[in-house]
């Protein structure tokens, strides 16, 4: 039996179980991004996650799953179901939803993601991105600006990487979902003086903040995914802060669905923002001059911090205690710099 036939047989149950979710945003069609049927069949993640070298499948999950909980992993790593005689993975990689290709890297050495691509799902509000990394190849025609359909083949699973080596035995798809913080990422990048060129524009991994793909897929399967906006608003708050500024970040103009109320006719004098524990700003409330009276300009003022989350999630630092109060941790500082230019 040839590889193509094996793929089609494995794909059948995936598309059967990942059809159109009733009541989802515009009848969202969500497709598992590989032929592995483990999630669709309700198998535990240990059966389909690829470990990161430790032998523990949990290290292929989302969040602080590595180095004893101190190292953050932005996506999930899905292991292959097919292998060629030479041991290479033979699984196709599929677009999880319809969208527009925004970034393609075919030279593995350009990124720790190796050969990878990013799709923005412009039919959603907000327009989530999905990222597909460590590919062996990218399909012809998959280039920036190309429109793709849910379930369309984007490439072939592999183990490509830049700056380190992933053995063929640990080939996998690294799959991410999230939002891009700023379209002016280059300004922040130049200011930080990293000493290397940014080859990825606003789709550089340092500008992407992820959400747990499994939470999204599980909400869809359970029929709770009425809209991406509602899904994000329902995520627990790790930090809520206010900042006095007349600046409206392009994050807000690109993702207006995350506004909790319409923008006023006059100028916005500040913002109240809710962040998840990963640093994703999920809810934006514009503030009037009266509401920011007494706040120092451009300096975040903490309204709420989930101290238990800050203690538990050691792979991210959003808030730290300083002089008897809360101050921005290193990860939140970066996001605020990218959003507002706050130092």
Image (cartoon, rainbow, N blue to C red):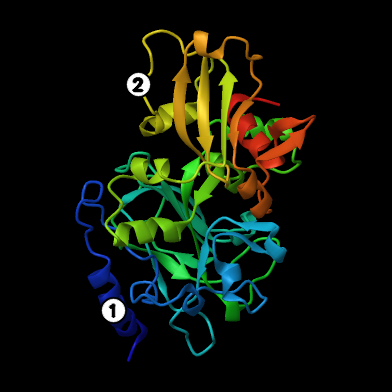
In the figure, is residue 332 to the left or right of 324? left
- Measuring from the top left, give residue 78's x and y in whole percent: 49, 70
Closer to the camera in the image, 5 or 290: 290
Q: Is residue 92 visible?
A: yes
- Which badge, 2 or 1, is on the more N-terminal residue? 1
Q: From the viewer's perspective, is residue 163 above or below residue 157?
A: above
Which residue is located at x 47 percent, y 86 percent? Answer: 84
* Residue 144 in view of the camera: no
Mark 2 packing: few (<14 Cα in 10 Å), some, or many (20+)? few
Pinpoint residue 241: horizontal percent, then vertical percent: 57, 29
Residue 198: give x, y in percent of width and height: 64, 42
Instruction: Assign a secondary structure to mark 1.
Output: helix
In the displayed structure image, the side of residue 288 where residue 342 appears, left or right: right
Q: Which residue is drawn at 36% across and 10% down?
A: 265
Of residues 99 and 55, which is closer to you in this image? 55
Q: In which quarter of the image is the C terminus?
A: top right
Question: What secondary structure is found at the residue carrying circle 2?
Answer: loop
Residue that numbered label 2 is attached to: 262
Above or below: residue 123 compared with residue 241: below
- Vertical arrangement, residue 343 with respect to residue 194, above or below: above
Q: To which residue does mark 1 refer?
A: 8
Residue lying at 36% horizontally and 84% vertically, measured from the top left: 3
Q: Quadrant of residue 332?
A: top right
In percent of the image, x 57 and y 68: which residue is there?
60
Question: Splitting the image into 4 quarters, where does residue 300 fall?
Answer: top right
Q: Where is residue 107 in the image (x, y as percent from the top left)?
A: 58, 58
Name the side, left or right, on which 10 lies relative to 269.
left
Q: Distance between the residues labelled 2 and 1?
A: 47 Å
């Amino acid at each position: 039996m040839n590889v193509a036939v094996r793929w089609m047989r494995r794909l059948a149950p995936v598309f059967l179980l990942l059809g159109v979710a009733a009541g989802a945003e515009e009848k969202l069609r969500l497709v598992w991004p590989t032929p592995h049927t483990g999630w669709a069949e309700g198998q535990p993640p240990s059966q389909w996650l690829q470990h990161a070298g430790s032998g523990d499948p949990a290290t292929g999950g989302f969040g602080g799953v590595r180095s004893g909980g101190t190292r953050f992993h932005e996506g999930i790593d899905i292991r292959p179901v097919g292998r060629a005689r030479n041991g290479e993975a033979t699984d196709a990689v599929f677009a999880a939803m319809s969208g527009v290709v925004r970034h393609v890297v075919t030279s593995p050495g350009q990124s720790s993601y190796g050969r990878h691509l990013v799709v923005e799902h412009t039919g959603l509000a907000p327009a989530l991105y999905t990222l597909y990394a460590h590919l062996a190849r990218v399909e012809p025609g998959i280039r920036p600006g190309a429109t793709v359909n849910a379930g369309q083949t984007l490439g072939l699973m592999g183990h490509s990487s830049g700056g380190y080596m992933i053995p063929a035995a640990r080939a996998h798809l690294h799959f991410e979902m999230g939002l891009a913080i700023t379209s002016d990422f280059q300004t922040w990048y130049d200011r930080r003086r990293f000493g290397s060129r940014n080859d990825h524009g606003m789709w550089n991994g340092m500008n992407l903040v992820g959400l747990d793909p499994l939470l999204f897929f599980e909400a869809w399967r359970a029929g709770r995914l009425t809209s991406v906006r509602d899904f994000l608003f329902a995520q627990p708050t790790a930090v809520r802060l206010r900042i006095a500024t007349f600046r409206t970040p392009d994050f807000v103009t690109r993702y207006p669905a995350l506004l909790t109320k319409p923008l006023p006719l006059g100028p916005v004098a500040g913002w109240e923002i809710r962040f998840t524990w990963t640093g994703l700003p999920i809810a934006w409330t514009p503030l009037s001059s009266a509401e920011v009276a007494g706040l120092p300009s451009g300096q975040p003022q903490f309204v709420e911090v989930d101290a238990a989350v800050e203690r538990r999630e050691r792979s991210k630092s959003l808030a730290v205690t300083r002089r008897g109060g809360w101050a921005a941790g290193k990860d939140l500082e970066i996001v605020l710099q990218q959003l507002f230019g706050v130092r």
